[in-house]
């Protein structure tokens, strides 16, 4: 049995943007499953609650398969290990 290639796309997603959705779509071309991990970081004073951010992402990717949205509040490495992922996706902002 082939092992699934699982990637994690972490961030606060406060709010999710078209750029985030673009990265999700691109990552799905490379991996069997993408976990969008929504960080609970109260020090950043998020505009939206974790539940709202998860819901916004779910709405934004409802037409995509193999995407899971999960909140997390531990170390990213621990989250990745718990979800059998060895790849972390990050976007870059151009100035």
Image (cartoon, rainbow, N blue to C red):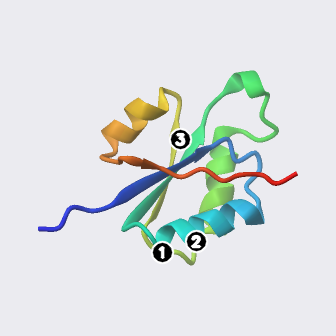
Please identify the residue farthest to the front as the structure is shown.
Answer: 95
Q: Where is residue 84 shown, x and y percent of the image?
A: 30, 46
Residue sitting at x 57%, y 70% = 26
Residue sitting at x 44%, y 69% = 30
Q: Where is residue 18 shown, x and y percent of the image?
A: 76, 66
Check contact, mark 1 vs mark 2: CB within 8 A.
yes
Q: Is residue 79 left or right of residue 36?
A: left
Say what secondary structure mark 3 lies in.
Answer: strand
Front residue of 27 and 45: 27
Residue sitting at x 74%, y 63% = 19
Please identify the residue farthest to the right as the structure is shown.
Answer: 95
Front residue of 94 and 53: 94
Q: Where is residue 39 shown, x and y percent of the image?
A: 60, 37
Residue sitting at x 77%, y 34% = 46
Q: Which residue is mark 3?
A: 71
Q: Is residue 47 above or below residue 67?
A: above
Cα distance in 3D space between marks 3 and 1: 23 Å
Say what secondary structure mark 2 lies in.
Answer: helix
Q: Where is residue 72 shown, x and y percent of the image?
A: 51, 35
Count numbered badges in the picture.
3
Q: Is residue 30 left or right of residue 18?
A: left
Q: Is residue 83 left or right of residue 9?
A: left
Front residue of 41 and 88: 88
Cα distance in 3D space between marks 3 and 2: 20 Å
Residue 29 disc label: 1
Please identify the residue farthest to the top as the structure is shown.
Answer: 43
Residue 25 disc label: 2
Kindly indicate the quadrant of the structure image that contains residue 62.
Answer: bottom right
Q: Nearer the viewer, mark 3 or mark 1?
A: 1
């Amino acid at each position: 049995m082939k092992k699934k290639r699982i990637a994690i796309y972490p961030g606060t997603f406060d709010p999710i943007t078209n750029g985030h959705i673009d990265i999700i779509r691109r990552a799905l071309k490379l991996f069997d499953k993408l976990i969008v991990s929504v960080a609970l970081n109260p020090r950043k004073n998020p505009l939206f609650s974790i539940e709202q951010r998860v819901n916004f992402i779910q709405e934004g990717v409802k037409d995509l398969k193999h995407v899971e949205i999960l909140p997390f509040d531990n170390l990213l490495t621990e989250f990745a290990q718990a979800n059998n992922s060895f790849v972390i996706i990050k976007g870059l902002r151009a100035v």
